[in-house]
Amino acid sequence: MIVVETSNRSGLPADEGAAADLARLVLAAEGIDDGELGIGFVGPGEIRALKREHLGIDEVTDVLSFPLDGRDELPEGAPRALGDVVLCPEVVRSEWRGPLVHGLLHLLGYDHGEEMAAREQRYAAR
């Protein structure tokens, strides 16, 4: 079972339930049927600080991913602590699906490129 915990510290409305549902759909399509995921909605100040702290880039962004477990590092059948995806509603506005999928794919080990872009487009349209 995929457990998705959401939190909204952004000060703006966020459809946490729809985000969790989309995350479960993407993870299931990618063959992940057991794991834990966090989705956080934060303000521009917090996402800027996270990007500065973790990537050394001082700017506001739409989404950041913080992966925890790798696919090949766990015993077969063990639940994965996938990590966290952090979104900024002030940046993504109503177009949160694409950035969320983008962040999820990074958690799963995808890097920018044609394969990731194709998957992102396919899943974000759901």
Image: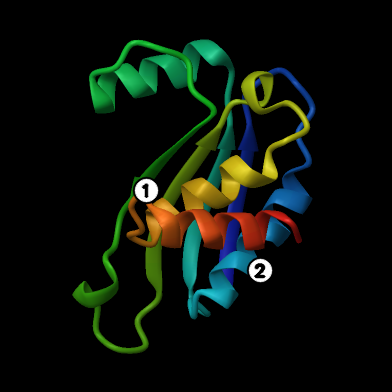
Q: Which label belongs to residue 25?
A: 2
Q: Is residue 1 visible?
A: no
Residue 103 position, x and y percent, is 48, 46
Q: In what quadrant of the picture does the C terminus appear?
A: bottom right
**What residue is at 47 percent from the left and 21 percent from the top?**
47
Look at mark 1 in the image and give the residue it sits on: 112
Seen from the viewer's position, the closer of residues 106 and 8 is 106
In the rendered image, the vertical position of residue 27 relative to residue 66, given as above or below:
below
Q: In what quadrant of the picture does the N terminus appear?
A: bottom right
Instruction: Using the rendered view, name the quadrant where residue 74 is placed.
Output: bottom left
**What residue is at 49 percent from the left and 22 percent from the top?**
61
In the rendered image, the vertical position of residue 18 relative to residue 92, given as above or below:
below
Residue type at mark 1: give it. Answer: His
Q: Secondary structure at mark 2?
A: helix
Residue type at mark 2: give it. Answer: Leu
Seen from the viewer's position, the closer of residues 115 and 30 is 115
Q: Is residue 83 visible?
A: yes
Residue 83 position, x and y percent, is 40, 52
| Front: mark 1 or 2 | 1
**What residue is at 50 percent from the left and 10 percent from the top?**
45
Give the alpha-carbon distance from disc 1 to disc 2, as whole Å.
21 Å
In the rendered image, the vertical position of residue 92 relative to residue 122, given as above or below:
above
Q: How is the image coloured?
A: rainbow
Residue 17 position, x and y percent, is 77, 51
